[in-house]
């Protein structure tokens, strides 16, 4: 099927066929509702599995042979071991040894350590990747070397694609810091402890075959079962699933950058002045330099106002755990654990709950947590005068980052982008984003070191902070200051050859990433 | 033919870790001048970078040789400065090549103003200058002295000059700390015309240094010459504190540098600070006597906020009007601790109101309740009111109801 480019509701040119499958161009926020039944794997019968529950296979290769991995199939892996992950690379090294070809890799995210897959792309073992591509993989895709189109989805969008049948996983390979021989698994203990396995949950339910790989095998039962063994076909014991030093950090340090601290402090003060910080409120913050500093300033403001939050969502860190222990937060709903304090707290504190993209972000859920959060603070590579945001490409069009939960978090009651106004002369506030990832109607506030721009659609927020001494200014005004400081940038020429598409949370295509030489 | 006196030169940092800066290398040659550019941002600013370099090349009449520019996202004022420094080092001569002035570059100079905090920014690091005006410090000091290595003095001078022109320093007073002696005079000559509000003169030991600095500034800027803040950093300087403070009408404040002073005293700097107690007291007495502001030294442990707060309280208690900051995060702590309490402000407001009333009614003496108040007390009360407004404990329109 030859692809044609069509203009979607955001005015962006997108292909109508992606990797041989018809696609729906973005139709607007909340406008697309696929119907039909959810996808499901074939029926399994317990009599086909060992009655004693021991599903061990001697090696990854033996497991692949047992589940019938073949040419052209879809293999999924997950990023809870972050840059320490050894399992995704081992999976494709094994597939290469077996002489397999044209596999599709469906990671929940990739990291620099996964540059290993480039040789498998070159040799034809991997046909293409549907998942975030950073660093060397991003450069590989941007340069047009990949055979299929890259497909970038949010964490929630990945669950949506699995549930509505857009992606059917043949074999899910789940790295497990702790597991039993039946396949029950969690991320709470062992040398590669990472907290939770939420990114693998959909795969464990919907993939045809599920393989758990662990370096910390326990006798049945392994509790808690974040992944249920009843969904698992085979368990493989290996000497190591990853490098602990690259999985979680020992400590999370507060940024010393004066600009980042200023942005974080302005954002926290904005939340206070706008009345968002009140008893029982909720927030989402990550472990990035600026968002971590935001949580620290927020904690100070909460202490001095005597206010507590009902729950905090997002990546847990030592700082978040301290807020929980101090009683500033009643619950942490954790999607990703960033340091060892986070792992310890999740293992021991019942108010520190592991979550998954199903509870937090899924478009096909009967609601999700993201829209219930009072305020979410996020980063971006660019934001434009219409408040549209870009989080996947650099200003030259090169793929830089995955979407993560970014698109999903935009449905928070107040979605704030915490960004420097420019980075080494490259303006972050621009006329038009290079790649559209988040529609401006969902982005409420942009906080930079040079001032705060509130989306004119949010007159309520503008009214709430009127009269405060915060540096509130129109986004056009910020842009004009940048034009003077950095100079008016040239418009880089992009090619007309798609190398990847960016999905919106509902599965439609919101924008295209073009080849860059 | 290579022009006589022209030699290879380089300006600006090199290496993979450089950000928001650039390196410019000149190699003499006989052919027509070529400019070779590599830049992380060439797809957005390639032409703009080359145009900026060309402006400098033309102003300096460089027509032969090779210029190699390695840019890591420097802003235009930095590109102009690095290119100018490179060509000067190569032996070319030309006029200052200035960036487009910021609207704030003409900000007015005020003799009497709050100087609670002053933020030091190294004069050789443009990345740290760009946001310097955003942190709300009462003053920003572009430093040409201790934070700049000797081999970079010439280049820092050009960077600081361009930063004075191109950047908006907000409500902060525009200060520059120059070097001692002949290097310092070159610094003064380079910056005098670009609206430095106040110049810090280091290691002053006598009247002559102050008068010399004032004369050099006046030579270059005439009526528009900058104000002065001498820094006392030696026992001799402390010994002559009053004469120095009163040496010239352009002196607005007197400060001291405790690191160098401690070294000369052979008494290491301690947290308690007894080794410098007399120096600090002397500075306050001399400044007050000469009618200028006494300003305290910096607190160097940026991670120790409580230590900083205690330090500011102590210096304020000795009579100092401000302290130095080496990181923006120190500024809010300094401002908080320099702010008088609500009770102090309330008492000061009563005194100021009484004084105004007395003046309106043509009375010579000011009375608050049954107590008579002397003029120095009124002046101090006015200062307390000003500090109260700046520190947010008193509304700026506190006396509107009186009118």
Image: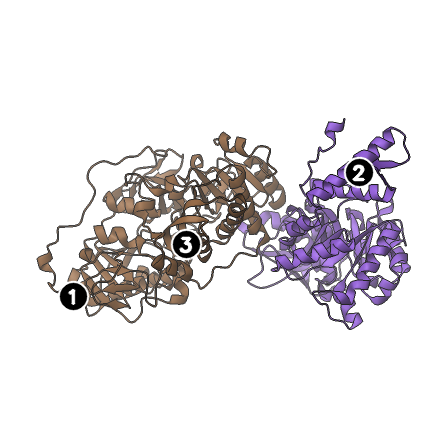
Chain colours: A brown, B purple
Mark 2 falls within which chain?
B
Which of label 2 and label 1 is nearer to you? 2
In the depicted structure, whether residue B265 falls above or below residue A497: below
CA gap, disc 3 and disc 2: 54 Å
Residue found at the far front of this picture: B370
> Quick check: do tags 2 and 1 share a chain?
no
> Residue B266 occupies which quadrant of the picture?
bottom right
Residue nearer the viewer, B215 or B280: B280
The N terminus of chain A: image quadrant:
top left
Residue holding disc 2: B351
Q: Position of residue B160 (x, y in %)?
A: 72, 53
A14 sits left or right of A54 in the view: right
Taking the spot 77% from the left edge, 48% from the top edge, the residue there is B196
- The percent coordinates of residue A505 (x first, y second) are 34, 41
Task: Tally the numbered discs.
Answer: 3
Task: Please give the label number shown on residue A316.
Answer: 3
Determine which of the numbered discs, if any, sits on residue B366 in the image.
none
- Judging from the image, what secondary structure is the residue with disc 1 in? loop
Task: Tell me where residue A85 appears, x and y as whole percent.
Answer: 35, 63
Residue A54 bears which disc, if any? 1
Q: Is residue A31 above or below residue B270?
A: above
Residue A470, given in percent of the width and then of the height, sits at 59, 39
Mark 3 and mark 1: Cα distance apart in space = 34 Å
Q: Is B217 positioned to the left or the right of A497 in the image?
A: right
| Mark 3 chain | A
Asked if badges 3 and 2 are on one and the same chain, I answer: no
Q: Secondary structure at mark 2?
A: helix
């Amino acid at each position: 099927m030859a692809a044609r480019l069509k203009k979607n509701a955001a005015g962006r040119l997108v292909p109508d066929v992606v990797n041989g499958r018809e696609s729906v161009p973005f139709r607007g926020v909340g406008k697309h509702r696929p119907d039909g039944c959810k996808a499901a794997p074939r029926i399994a019968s317990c009599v086909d599995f060992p009655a004693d529950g021991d599903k061990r296979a001697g090696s990854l290769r033996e497991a692949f042979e047992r589940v019938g991995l073949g040419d052209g199939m879809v293999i999924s892996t997950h990023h809870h071991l972050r840059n320490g992950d050894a399992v995704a690379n081992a999976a494709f090294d094994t597939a290469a040894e077996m002489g397999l070809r044209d596999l599709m890799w469906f990671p929940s995210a990739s990291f620099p350590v996964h540059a290993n897959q480039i040789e498998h792309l070159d040799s034809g073992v991997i046909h293409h990747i549907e998942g975030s591509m950073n660093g060397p993989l991003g450069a590989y895709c941007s340069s047009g070397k990949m055979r299929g189109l890259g497909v970038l989805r949010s964490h929630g969008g990945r669950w949506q694609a699995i549930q509505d049948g857009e992606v059917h996983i043949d074999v899910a390979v789940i790295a497990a810091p702790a597991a039993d021989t039946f396949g029950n698994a969690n991320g709470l203990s062992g040398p590669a402890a990472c907290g939770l396995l939420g990114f693998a949950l959909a795969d464990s339910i919907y993939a045809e075959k599920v393989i758990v790989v662990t370096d910390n095998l326990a006798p049945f039962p392994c509790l808690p079962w974040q992944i249920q063994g009843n969904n698992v076909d085979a368990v493989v014991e290996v000497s190591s699933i990853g490098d602990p030093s690259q999985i979680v950090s020992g400590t999370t340090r507060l940024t010393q950058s004066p600009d980042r601290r200023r942005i974080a402090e302005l954002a926290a003060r904005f939340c206070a002045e706008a009345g968002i910080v009140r008893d029982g409120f909720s927030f989402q913050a990550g472990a990035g330099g600026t968002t971590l500093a935001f949580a620290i300033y927020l904690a100070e403001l909460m202490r001095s106002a005597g206010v507590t939050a009902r729950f905090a969502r997002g990546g847990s860190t030592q700082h978040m755990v301290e807020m929980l222990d101090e009683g500033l937060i009643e619950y942490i709903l954790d999607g990703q654990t960033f340091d060892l304090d986070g792992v310890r707290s999740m293992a021991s504190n019942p108010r520190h709950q592991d979550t998954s993209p199903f509870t937090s972000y899924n478009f096909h859920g009967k609601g999700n947590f993201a829209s219930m959060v009072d305020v979410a603070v996020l980063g971006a590579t660019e934001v434009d005068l219409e408040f549209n945001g870009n989080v996947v490409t650099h200003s030259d069009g090169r793929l830089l980052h995955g979407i993560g939960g970014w698109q999903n978090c935009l449905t928070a009651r107040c979605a704030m982008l915490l960004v420097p106004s420019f980075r080494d002369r490259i303006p972050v506030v621009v006329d038009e984003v290079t790649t559209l990832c988040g529609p401006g109607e969902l982005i409420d506030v942009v906080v930079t070191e040079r001032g705060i721009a509130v989306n004119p659609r949010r007159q309520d927020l503008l009214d709430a902070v009127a009269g405060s001494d915060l540096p509130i200014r129109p986004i056009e005004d910020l842009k004009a200051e940048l034009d003077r400081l950095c100079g008016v940038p040239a418009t880089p020429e992009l090619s007309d050859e798609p190398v990847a598409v960016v999905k919106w949370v509902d599965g439609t295509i919101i924008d295209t990433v073009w080849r860059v030489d | 033919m290579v022009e006589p006196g022209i030699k290879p030169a380089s300006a600006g940092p090199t290496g993979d870790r450089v950000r928001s800066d650039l390196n410019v290398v000149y190699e003499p040659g006989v052919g027509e001048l070529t400019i070779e550019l590599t830049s992380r941002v060439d797809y957005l600013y390639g032409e703009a970078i080359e145009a900026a370099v060309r402006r400098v090349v033309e102003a300096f009449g460089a027509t032969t040789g090779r210029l190699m520019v390695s840019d890591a996202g420097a802003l235009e004022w930095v590109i102009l400065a690095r290119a100018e420094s490179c060509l000067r080092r190569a032996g070319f001569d030309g006029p200052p090549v200035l960036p487009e002035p910021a609207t704030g570059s003409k900000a007015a100079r005020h003799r009497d103003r709050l100087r609670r905090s002053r933020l030091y920014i190294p004069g050789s690091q443009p990345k740290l200058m760009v946001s310097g005006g955003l942190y709300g410090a009462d003053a920003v000091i572009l430093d040409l002295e201790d934070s700049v290595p000797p081999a970079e003095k010439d280049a820092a001078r050009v960077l600081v000059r361009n930063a004075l022109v191109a950047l908006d320093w907000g409500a902060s007073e525009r200060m520059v700390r120059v070097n001692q002696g002949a290097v310092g005079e070159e610094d003064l000559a380079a910056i005098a015309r670009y609206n430095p509000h106040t110049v810090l003169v280091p290691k002053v030991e006598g009247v002559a240094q102050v008068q010399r600095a004032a004369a050099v500034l006046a030579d270059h800027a005439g009526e528009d010459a900058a104000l002065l803040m001498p820094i006392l950093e030696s026992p001799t300087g402390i010994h002559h504190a009053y004469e120095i403070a009163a040496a010239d009408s352009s002196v607005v404040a007197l400060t001291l540098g405790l690191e160098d002073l401690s070294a000369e005293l052979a008494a290491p700097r301690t947290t308690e600070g007894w080794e410098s107690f007399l120096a600090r007291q002397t500075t306050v007495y001399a400044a007050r006597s000469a009618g200028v502001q006494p300003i305290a030294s910096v607190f160097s442990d940026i991670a120790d906020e409580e230590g900083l707060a205690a330090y500011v309280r102590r210096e304020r208690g000795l009579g100092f009007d401000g302290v130095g900051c080496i990181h923006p995060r120190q500024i809010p702590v300094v401002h908080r601790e320099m702010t008088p309490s609500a009770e102090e402000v309330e008492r000061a407001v009563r005194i100021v109101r009484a004084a105004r009333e007395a003046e309106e009614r043509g009375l010579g003496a000011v009375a608050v309740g049954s107590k008579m108040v002397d003029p120095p007390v009124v002046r101090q009360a006015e200062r307390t009111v000003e500090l109260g407004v700046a520190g947010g404990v008193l509304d700026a329109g506190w006396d509107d109801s009186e009118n």
